[in-house]
């Protein structure tokens, strides 16, 4: 655009000079007396003044064009500055929005765990405060279940002990002391140990148990 403007100014000046030259020729042809009177010096002075006027006009056009360009540049710069200011404002708004911290979420206070309740332990009752209950007694009678040989009644609870008496098959009697494997029994007026595996026991009442054994036990 600047190059076109410069060319236009040059063409304008050249055309102006050509116009002046044509006027000068016309003037010379019409009135030779005027030029003769003024002389060659006056003609050159006149042409110089006209040239100065032409240059002043050309400079004026150039200045006006420069001012127009400057105004356009200022307008362009003004739009650019406005855009930059708008972008800066938007950036500030984004920064302000991002810098706004959300309100902290308050969690409800944690419930304290319930303390385990200790089991209530009952204090042991002193031995002297306990009611002493009489031990329940059981009474048994027996019948031997040996069928082929006599059942040996021994002095101690083992097979190597001395034999006190022999009970025939199917003999009956009473248990004085009941043990796990051997029991102290009474039969036919004798007392001694017999193996439980050869005795068939039967629980009886206190009245059916012999009084002498009951008192002795």
Image: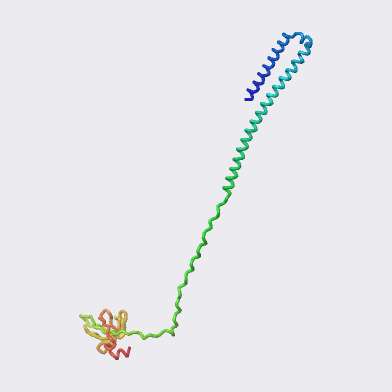
Query: Which quadrant of the figure has residue 129?
Result: bottom left
Q: Reply above or below: 49 against 172.
A: above
Q: For residue 24, what is the image quadrant?
A: top right
Can residue 104 be seen here?
A: yes
Q: Observer-nearest residue: 174 or 198?
A: 174
**How many numbered marks does the figure carry?**
0
Q: Position of residue 11 (x, y in %)?
A: 65, 18
Q: How is the image coloured?
A: rainbow
Q: Residue 143: give x, y in percent of width and height.
A: 24, 83
Residue 156 vs residue 92: left or right? left
Q: Is residue 38 above or below residue 186?
A: above
Task: Write the residue at 62% across / 40% down.
Answer: 85
Residue at 27% x, 79% y is 197
Work out whether residue 196 or residue 76 is closer to the camera in this orientation and state it: 76
- Above or below, 82 against 32 in this view is below
Q: Nearer the viewer, residue 49 or 171?
A: 49
Tell me where residue 14 sits by quadrant: top right
Q: Is residue 50 left or right of residue 153?
A: right
Residue 106 placement, left or right of 164: right
Q: Is residue 184 visible?
A: no
Of 180 and 207, nearer the camera is 207
Looking at the rendered image, the quarter that the C terminus falls into is: bottom left
At a point 45% along the width and 77% down the height, the residue shown is 122
Q: Where does the image place residue 195, in percent across and percent down from the top left?
A: 28, 81
Residue 95 in picture, x, y percent from top left:
59, 46
Q: Residue furthest left?
A: 148
């Amino acid at each position: 655009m600047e190059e076109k403007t410069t060319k236009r100014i040059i063409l304008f000046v050249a055309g102006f000079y050509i116009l002046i030259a044509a006027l000068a020729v016309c003037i010379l042809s019409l009135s030779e007396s005027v030029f003769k009177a003024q002389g060659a010096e006056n003609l050159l002075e006149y042409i110089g003044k006209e040239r100065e006027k032409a240059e002043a006009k050309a400079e004026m056009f150039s200045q006006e064009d420069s001012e127009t360009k400057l105004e356009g540049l200022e307008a362009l710069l003004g739009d650019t500055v406005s855009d930059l200011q708008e972008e800066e404002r938007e950036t500030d708004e984004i920064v302000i929005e991002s810098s706004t911290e959300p309100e902290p979420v308050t969690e409800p206070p944690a419930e304290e765990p319930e303390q385990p309740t200790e089991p209530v332990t009952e204090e042991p009752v002193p031995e002297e405060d306990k009611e002493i209950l009489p031990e329940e007694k059981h009474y048994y009678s027996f019948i031997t279940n040996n069928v082929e040989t006599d059942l040996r009644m021994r002095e101690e609870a083992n097979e190597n002990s001395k034999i006190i008496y022999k009970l025939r098959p199917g003999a009956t009697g009473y248990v004085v002391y009941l043990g796990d494997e051997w029991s102290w029994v009474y039969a036919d007026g004798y007392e001694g140990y017999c193996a439980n595996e050869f005795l068939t026991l039967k629980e009886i009442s206190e009245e059916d148990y012999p009084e002498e054994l009951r008192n002795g036990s």
